Image (tube, helix red, strand yellow):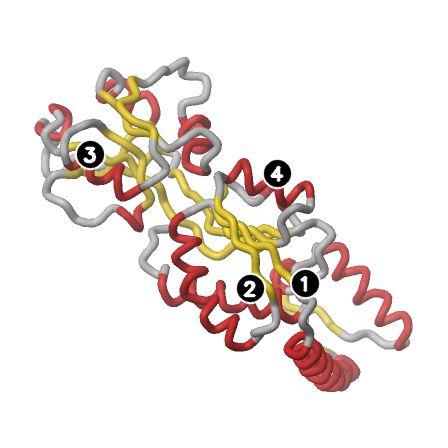
Amino acid sequence: MTKAARKLYISQPTLSQFLSKQESEIGAPLFKRANGTYVLTPVGELYADYARKVLSLTDILEKDICRISNTSRIKIGTSASRALQMLTFILVDFCKYYPQVELTLSNGSLQIMNEAISKGDMDVAFVTVPSLEPWKGQSIELKKEEVVFAVPVSHPYCRQLGPDTPHTLNSSQLIEHFGSSPFILQLKGSCIRYLIDDFFEGRNFNPVVACNTSNAHSICDMVASNIGSGFIPTGYAVSSPQIACFSLEPKMYRTHSILYRKDLIPGAPHRYLFDLAEKYAKEHWENFSE
């Protein structure tokens, strides 16, 4: 039930209430529960067959209306370079299918995108977030990606590691071995910076900051150049003889997500955009560690 509600972009209680109302109006159950799974009854099978036909016709109607309309508009925001890279790719297909839909693109930090979505100034935002909990009922998870701690291999701690030493660090170990070394951190208001602040919460730790940047490639280059250590998503943690990466305890994840306005009723163009994003994430982000 929860997975179905997420697929429909509604809450689980809303879906449960809808099904109860349908069964009440029809006068017969649509589902029976067997071994923890919802199975359609014979009446449910008939209902589902007709529902598919209705939805198919409705979808065709919506698409045809949108394709000949010149008034549709979607305001889209991004907060991460990977999201912008994805949009650049999927909007080629989107614009071919919906040439009359006007798109407005903007970029900013997670904090800026969240405020724009909350105020209704933005329709859809492709972002990375520490957690989707604050956006229940108005978000879609695309992919989780682990964030690791990258350090120069020349650091004294790396030189003393044995072949069987696990490459993991908790906050106490990280502060003990790297606390006096320079850090390269993400900008305030970004997803990973929120994660870093939570990781060190209660430790009264003020790192020596060599640089603040929102560019993960720059962090990797600076770590490789022995300027300092930093936190990077595993998608950027390419094999480099100058960099050693450590998983964190507890593990740190950022979630690639779609957020949308609370009052937004996703139409055919929105759903097509969401489908393209989910397909892209499945095909191009399969190597992210989870």
Graded by Cα atoms within 10 Å as few (under 14), some (14 to 19) or many (20 or more), the crowding at tag 4 reads few
Mark 1 Cα shell of 10 Å, populated few (<14), some (14-19), many (≥20): some
Badge 2 or badge 3: first in the primary sequence: 3
In this rendering, the label closer to the viewer, 3 or 4: 4
Residue tagged by mark 3?
223
Give the residue drawn at x 48%, y 32%. Answer: 189
Do the CB atoms of the residues marked 4 and 2 lie less than 8 Å apart?
no
Q: Nearer the viewer, mark 4 or mark 2?
A: 4
As helix, strand or loop, the secondary structure at mark 1 comes to: loop
Q: CA distance from mark 3 to mark 4?
A: 32 Å
The Cα atoms of the two marked residues, 2 and 3, are separated by 35 Å
Which numbered disc, 4 or 1, marks the residue closer to the eye?
4
Task: Give the residue type that dot 1 points to.
Answer: Pro
Earlier-in-chain disc, 2 versus 1: 1
User: Does residue 126 appear to the left or right of 88 in the view shown?
Assistant: right
Give the mark nearest the N terminus, 4 or 2.
Answer: 4
User: Nearer the N terminus, badge 4 or badge 1?
Assistant: 4
Residue type pointed to by label 4: Glu
Q: Which residue is mark 1?
A: 266
Q: Secondary structure at mark 3?
A: helix
Which badge, 1 or 3, is on the more N-terminal residue?
Answer: 3
Residue at mark 1 to residue at mark 3: CA–CA distance = 43 Å
| Circle 4 SS class | helix
Instruction: From this view, report whether residue 11 is shown above or below residue 72.
Output: above
Q: Quadrant of residue 224?
A: top left
Residue 264 horizontal side relative to residue 211, left or right: right
Identify residue type, mark 2: Phe
Residue 189 in sight in this render = yes
**Which residue in the protein does label 4 denote?**
115
Q: Position of residue 104 (x, y in %)?
A: 56, 56
What residue does disc 2 label?
274
